Amino acid sequence: MFLIIAWQSYYNILLKAAKNIKGIDIKIYSAMALEKDEEKLNSALRDIENAKLIFLYRSNETVWEYIEEKIKQGVDAKIICLSHDPSYWLLSNVDKETIAKAYNYLVINGEKNVTNMLKYLLRKCLSFPVEYEEPEKIPWEGIYHPDSKRIFLSIDDYLRWYKPKDAPFVGILFSRHYLINENLELEDLIIRGLEKRGINVIPAFSYSLKDDSLGTKGNDEVVKEFFIDKDGKPRIDAFIKLTSFFLGQKKGSDLQGKDVAEGGVELLKRLSVPCFSPISSYYKTIDEWESEKEGLNQDIGWSIAMPEFEGIIEPILVAAQIQGSDDTRKKTPINDRVEKFLERVIRWIELRRIPPEKRKVAFILHNNPCASVEATVGAGAHLDTLESVARILKRMKEVGYKVRVPEDGKALIKEIMDKKAISEFRWTTVDEIVEKGGAIAFVEKEKYLEWFDELPDKAKKRVIDAWGRPPGEWKDGIPPAMLYDGKIVITGISYGNAICCVQPKRGCAGARCDGQVCKILHDPDVPPPHQYIATYKWISREFGAHVIIHVGTHGNLEFLPGKGTGLSSSCFPDISIDTIPHLYIYNSDNPPEGTIAKRRSYAVLVDHMQTVMTGSGLYEDLEELDRLVSEYEQVKVKDRAKAHALEHIIMDTIKKTNLDKGIKNIDSMSFDEIVREIHGRLSRIRNTQIQDGMHIFGEVPKGERKVDFIYSILRYDMGDGPSIRREVAKMLGYDLAELISNQEKIDEKEKKSYGEILERIDILCKEIIKQVLMEGRDA
């Protein structure tokens, strides 16, 4: 018996090849199937005992541990074990030449080559009377098109055949594996879909890894050869990358290295076009994906996270597996998801090509439900969103956008509040919003029904169950949201070809609100109301925004109900964002929630700098207390009378500042113990970093704020690397770690606490930074 156990990616072709060989019993198992079915695993382990020839292609499933353990117990069989990792080849017990030749057959791939590999192994290892042919060479990389019977090895040859239209180009890079295995349904659908929309395509394939021993080019070389012209300019207006391998990845690359994606990032900068990486699930069948709430947990690392390292966007699921007979699995497109993806690609190309004077932009400011509206409109972590939008609009006008510009952030919020341009369910009536000019548009019921009827039935049912039939109706004693004369009110301020809207509310109980609305904000089950959906659809379809920009961390779009990753057409972030290119001005120190925004609302994050941080220092009574305890340390030995007088003053000041409230057993402590405790508390206060105002997008700190900003980064001691704070401490004769750990301790020589010494070190460090900046300016 000839036993084959293989990684799923090779299983299909091995099964097909095995059926081409007659006269011998060939058993073949998929490692993925063995992982899921214990009965099949036990059957495979029994077959290992009876096999005369065993071919393995080792992957990472846990079942391989059982298989290897069984083989190591001793089997009477010739074993050929291959893998992407050559260390696994050591399980083989045949000569190196046989292993190498088998690998050559398999890696070149194709039904003919894999059939000949099996014949070769049968002849070589078992002297089975079968003829085989040498491996047939098939191009490692080239250009494919479903209308052509040949592969193009040069871009010029392809373009002469293709005869492109006067239209944008999209470059597509996909894996050679799917070409060789005739599984190109997804690639063909993308090619046809783009051409149907008037777009030219250059569909290139590659082996994915640069491998000098095979003579394969890397993905980066393929991109340069086919998508960049001889003058170094991109031939394409957008790039669709259907392989998860890094563009610059080579065989044996260390995926743990911090610079593993660096080559790809530099290449994408050179291309300077939108680069998309839609998801094809390797692990999930389409039925499994549709039925699960979580999404694509098993695919996250390879199919979602890895492309993110290169800055690639739009992680929309476009394909998953279809389970066939004999444990075969086939990558199959999800048609409605492919259509969604292609529409988004088209709008990104349009955004890139349309001149600024015709470009339309929608800004979305956030606000929290159930709180004071004036205080929460434009909320954004560490960002002055209002002033940021005003300045962005000013810059847009300078470069040719047809926009009106508010004087500043204060003028912007004043106009919003004067016109009541908010989606308000509690304190302001819709009549007042309309009367004061806060309605930027009205959506007729018939128009909204067109949009609403596009939704899958289960999504429509969820909205109706929560908020009534379109465009909204009384539900469980809650009035319909934001309806005026039967029409849905869209609120916002028009600035010409730009609008500024406050994000619609997730829902509210109106005047009878009992506080439960707060639970709606991130509720995974409650869908947004009709006005929420209508607002985003109006921005996309009627206003015709070329890009939507959410300003500040964070709103609620990315937290709407739906799958965690690989969203479906029933997921509300996907429904709401529609097909608009999405930029999100986001706080760079919050990557976990930024990742959610990228994966669930297809956001391109534009990180902003942090708020300037500075030392809090001491003030008023705390400053006086610090002076008193320092004076006490100076006189407590040489002037006991003065020290005694200071004890009473210090205790009164401690009580005045309420510091005594946090000291346990203060009444039973000696005075010196109390002073040490106070030193520690004052040190922690004076050395705490606090925010100095809010950051304004695009504004670089200047003067003392620049010094504070740089030092707030440099002050942290990372241990191994250079540290200005540690070096200055060393020059003063101190160990920084000891100072930080014992801030209440008194230095007997200086008669100052370690906390005060740390403050002195901070002052010296800032002076050094200031001098360096001044020298740089002179240079």
Image (tube, rainbow, N blue to C red):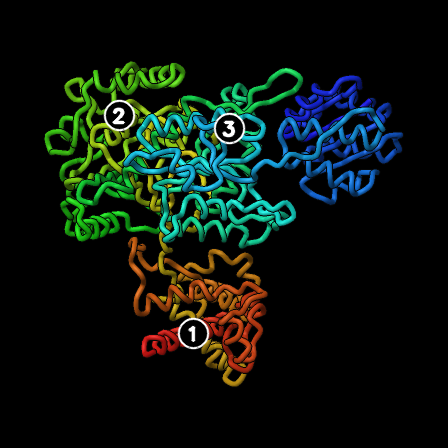
Tag 2 residue = 534
Q: Earlier in the sequence, mark 2 or mark 3?
A: 3
The x and y percentages for residue 580 are 31, 34
Residue 423 left/right relative to 303: left
Report the residue at 52% width, 49% height from top.
248
- Of 327 and 17, the residue lying toward us: 17
Left or right of residue 50: residue 260: left
254 or 197: nearer the viewer: 197
> Which three-letter amino acid code belongs to the residue tagged 2?
Ala
Label 2 neighbourhood size at 10 Å, few (<14), some (14-19), many (20+)?
many
Q: Nearer the viewer, mark 2 or mark 1?
A: 2
Query: SS at mark 3?
Result: loop
Q: CA distance from mark 2 to mark 3?
A: 26 Å
Q: Is residue 410 visible?
A: no
Q: Which residue is mark 1?
A: 628
Residue on which the image places disc 3: 295
> How far from the left and from the top, in percent, is residue 396?
21, 49
Q: Quadrant of the N terminus?
A: top right
N-terminal of the two: label 2 or label 1? 2
* Label 1 – label 3 distance at C-alpha: 62 Å
Report, in whole angstroms, how far the alpha carbon at label 2 lies from the one at label 1. 64 Å
Q: Nearer the viewer, residue 630 or 297?
A: 297
Q: Quadrant of the C terminus?
A: bottom left
User: Which quadrant of the structure image shows residue 503?
Assistant: top left
Which image quadrant is residue 673 in? bottom right
Q: Which mark is residue 145?
A: none
Measured along the vertical axis of the image, is residue 672 above or below residue 750? Answer: above
